[in-house]
């Protein structure tokens, strides 16, 4: 079995928030997670129509360019009143060069006038690990985090849509949760816990 404690792994993302969060959750595995930006890689073209497809595209792109094992995350927020939007377009909802504030403002505007009970939403996350670019059996894990979209932002923690996402289980905004709590219960945490549990057996099949 490969020694996962010596594994150097590329995170197929330049998002520093994701790098911190994923590194913290996977710390017990001993994996050395490095951002693809260290190789000056451009972001892959996310041409898939699902979170799974886009995660595979990103993982394969990084593996091809670096020759290393890769982990890719594709995640987003689904709002029931908007038929699942922004979904896979969450990161660029307000436009390709817009930031999280712009995305949050556009989502709040789209829900203007929608009552609290009809603002149900969830974060979805798919995590893909690939041993190499031609890996025929990538490891695919997923998680979901139920809540609703708030009427206005609250809290200054987290990133992305966290300031406007109300977490049902905690009865508070995601941006007001501690990093430690979020790393235990979020959609990404759920997917990464699956990944952590399955990695040893999956790597042994290499």
Image: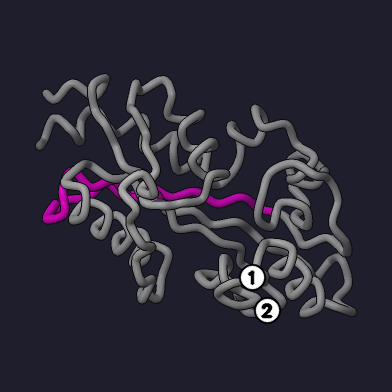
* Residue 44 % position (x, y): 34, 65
Instruction: Identify the disc placed on residue 69.
Output: none
Instruction: Identify the disc placed on residue 98.
Output: 1
Residue at (82, 43) in percent of width and height: 171
**Residue under pointer 2:** 82
Q: Is residue 71 magenta?
A: no
**Tag 1's secondary structure?**
loop
**Viewed as shown, does residue 119 lie left or right of 7?**
right
**Viewed as shown, does residue 62 lie left or right of 97?**
left
* Residue 196 % position (x, y): 37, 31
Compared to 16, does 53 lie above or below? below
Q: Is 91 in front, or is 198?
A: 91
* Residue 37 % position (x, y): 39, 49
Location of residue 60 (image quadrant)? bottom left
Are the residues flagged by discs 1 and 2 in contact, CB closer than 8 Å? no
Mark toward the start of the polypeptide (1 vs 2): 2
Compared to 19, does 112 lie above or below? below
Compared to 95, does 15 lie above or below? above
- Give the position of the N terminus as an image quadrant: top left
**Tag 2's secondary structure?**
helix
**In the image, which residues are magenta?**
127-146
């Amino acid at each position: 079995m490969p020694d996962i404690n010596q594994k150097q792994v590329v995170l197929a993302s330049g998002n520093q928030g994701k790098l911190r969060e994923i590194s913290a959750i996977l710390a017990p595995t001993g994996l050395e997670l490095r951002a693809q930006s260290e190789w000056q890689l451009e972001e892959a073209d996310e041409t898939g129509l699902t979170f799974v497809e886009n995660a595979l595209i990103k993982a394969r792109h990084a593996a091809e360019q670096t020759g290393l094992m890769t982990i890719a995350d594709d995640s987003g927020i689904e709002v029931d009143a908007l038929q699942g939007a922004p979904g896979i377009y969450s990161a660029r909802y307000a436009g390709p060069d817009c930031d999280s504030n712009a995305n949050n403002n556009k989502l709040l505007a789209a829900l203007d006038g929608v009552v609290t009970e009809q603002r149900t939403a969830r974060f979805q996350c798919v995590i893909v690990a690939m041993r190499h670019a031609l890996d025929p059996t990538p490891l695919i894990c997923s998680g979901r985090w139920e809540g609703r979209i708030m009427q206005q932002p609250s809290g200054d923690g987290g990133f992305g849509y966290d300031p406007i996402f109300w977490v049902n289980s905690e009865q508070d905004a995601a941006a007001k949760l501690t990093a430690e709590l979020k790393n235990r219960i979020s959609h990404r945490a759920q997917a990464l816990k699956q990944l952590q549990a399955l990695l040893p057996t999956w790597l042994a099949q290499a």
